[in-house]
């Protein structure tokens, strides 16, 4: 309940905040440097990299800003963003947000494990329901910087949940993802990643 309350508080407080207002057309040219890993249209062809197509522009800008400041660690991304201005980030984010994401299918064997966690969490184990921030269909909330996670690459989801669990990644609002992921087992992480591929 604590995490849900924090999430709702953040959402309400950010409603009046201006969102990233980039130029998608300018962003298309600037995003050419992102294509090798994330795909020209934001649908990363290699599963260890995230799909950016359809992602909330505000969330993309936050991640780029965090890479640049060092709040989120990744040697490749930290190098890629160093020369980007705030305008560049907003334009790139607007471009990827405008692109349609390629949808996948959920593996049947993942549903029994993942669906109860996604929809209801586990109060006894202090696991917040994923849908409390990411929504019932995984669409997230742009103003609150909660990412769209539906149709995301499975291997990327696994790696990020593992990083949140270990504390290697900790740029989440109020530590909500760290608090939740540290209680997830490897089996649950794998199942959630498979479940999200087809959640749309």
Image: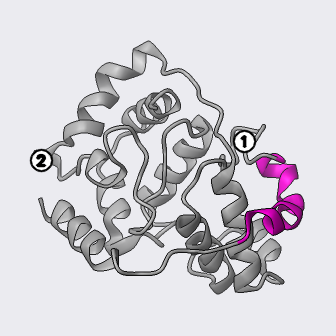
Q: Earlier in the sequence, mark 2 or mark 1?
A: 1
**Which residue position holds label 1?**
43
Tell me which residue sits at (25%, 51%) in the image: 132
Q: Is residue 39 magenta?
A: yes
Tag of residue 191? none
**For this rendering, which residue is in front, 193 or 40?**
40
Which residue range is magenta in the image?
A: 23-40
Q: Nearer the viewer, residue 171 or 100?
A: 100
Outermost residue toward the top? Answer: 108
Where is residue 47 drawn, in percent x and y?
Answer: 69, 38
Q: Residue at (25%, 73%) from the top-left corner? A: 12
**Element under disc 2:** helix
Prevalent SS, magenta region = helix
Q: Quadrant of residue 16?
A: bottom left
Instruction: Give the image location of residue 97, x and y in percent.
Output: 63, 55
Circle 1 sits in a helix, a strand or a loop, which is it?
Answer: loop
- Identify the colour scheme used: one colour
Please provide percent x and percent y for residue 19: 51, 75
Total marks placed: 2
Residues 116 and 103: in front is 103
| Vertical side of 62 occupied by 142: above or below | above
Residue 200 appears left or right of 95: left
Discs 2/1, front: 1
| 112 magenta-colored | no
Task: Report if the CB atoms under discs 2 and 1 are less than 8 Å apart.
Answer: no
Instruction: Name the residue tied to disc 2.
Output: 123
Relative to 26, is 137 above or below?
above
């Amino acid at each position: 309940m604590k995490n849900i309350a924090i999430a709702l508080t953040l959402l309400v407080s950010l409603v009046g905040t201006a969102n990233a207002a980039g130029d998608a057309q300018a962003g298309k040219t600037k995003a050419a440097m992102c294509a090798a890993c994330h795909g020209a249209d934001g649908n990363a062809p290699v599963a260890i990299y995230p799909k950016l197509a359809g992602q909330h522009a505000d969330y993309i800008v936050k991640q780029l800003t965090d890479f640049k400041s060092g709040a989120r660690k990744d040697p490749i991304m930290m190098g890629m963003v160093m020369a980007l201005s705030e305008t560049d980030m907003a334009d790139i984010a607007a471009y990827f947000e405008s692109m349609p994401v390629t949808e996948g299918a959920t593996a049947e064997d993942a549903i029994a494990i993942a669906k109860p966690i996604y929809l209801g969490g586990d109060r006894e184990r202090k696991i917040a329901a994923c849908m409390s921030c990411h929504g019932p269909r995984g669409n997230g909330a742009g103003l609150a910087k909660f990412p769209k996670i539906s149709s995301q690459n499975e291997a990327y989801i696994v790696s990020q949940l593992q990083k949140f669990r270990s504390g290697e990644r900790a740029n989440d609002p109020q530590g909500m993802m760290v608090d939740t992921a540290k209680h997830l087992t490897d089996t649950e992480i794998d199942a959630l990643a498979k479940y999200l591929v087809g959640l749309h």
